[in-house]
Image: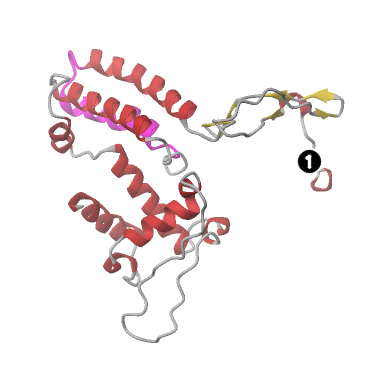
Amino acid sequence: MASNGLQLNASKTKCMLLHSSRRKIETGLDVHVDGVTVDQVRVFKYLGVLINDTLTWSDHVDMIYRKVSCRLNLLRRLSWFLPRSLLLTYLKSYILPHFDYCDVVWSGCTQDESRCLESLLNFGCKIVLHRRRDSSSTAALQELGLTTLTLRRKLHMAQCMFRSLSSQAPPYLSRLFSYVSCHHNTRSSFTSQLNLPLVRSSFGQKAFSFAGASLWCSLPTAIRATPNLSLNNYTELCKRFYSNA
């Protein structure tokens, strides 16, 4: 850092001991910088994303749940006197961004955590439509032209993959992926398939290098191998594919 003219502010520095959630750590870290003890933390917020010492997304999902719950309470009060169009605008402008922010990063959350967030979006849609909480969530989403959060995360990851493979993303993302080499020069040999990195556990499958490549390979060849495809056209094709899946 000193060679780059940077100086570490020890008072604002935190340290974290990463470990498995199945293993309880009794001892802590003893880190000093310039004679100042660096505080050890279990959770740290980095660019709006909560990262914990077990590399799970439970703390981040809990933060989203709390923020969205407060805004849903306000939406419920507004529903008493605002028309549906304004309520939908509020839902899209002040609630959906909390679900969408960095969702490619934390898309590896558990199914229980995903269902927990889905229930919040479903409740918000029913508030906008003035429907009972036990009414159909699928019908409410379709009427408002929205999709499930799981589908939104898939679409956002697909967009991120398109940017990474078309040199529209930072190089460190593009370097994570490589195409399967074909030795036969035939018309059907090029299918834009990506090499899947070797992982030893389901935890490794949550990494963007694996999850992104796996999602890309699951797309139809007609989408992956279409030349000169713009991001907007690619997004529309992915929407149709996921909607019909």
Give the crowd class for mark 1: few <14, some 14-19, many >=20 residues within 10 Å.
Answer: few
Q: For residue 140, what is the image quadrant?
A: top left
Q: Residue at x 45, y 71 (%)?
A: 180
Mainly helix, strand or loop, the magenta region? helix
Question: Is residue 231 shown left or right of residue 136?
Answer: right
Please, what is the three-letter code of the amino acid marked with disc 1?
Answer: Leu
Relative to 150, is 171 above or below?
below
Residue 89 seen in the current view: yes
User: Can you identify the residue that label 1 sits on?
Assistant: 6
Q: Residue at x 43, y 58 (%)?
A: 213
Point out the stretch of residues depicted in magenta.
79-102
Q: Residue at x 45, y 63 (%)?
A: 165
Relative to 236, is 99 above or below?
above
Q: Position of residue 234 (x, y in %)?
A: 31, 60
160 or 113: which is nearer to us?
Answer: 113
Is residue 193 located in the magenta-colored stretch of the structure?
Answer: no
Q: Position of residue 114 (x, y in %)?
A: 35, 33
Q: Residue at x 54, y 30 (%)?
A: 22
Question: Is residue 145 shown left or right of residue 160?
Answer: left
Q: Position of residue 209 (x, y in %)?
A: 49, 54
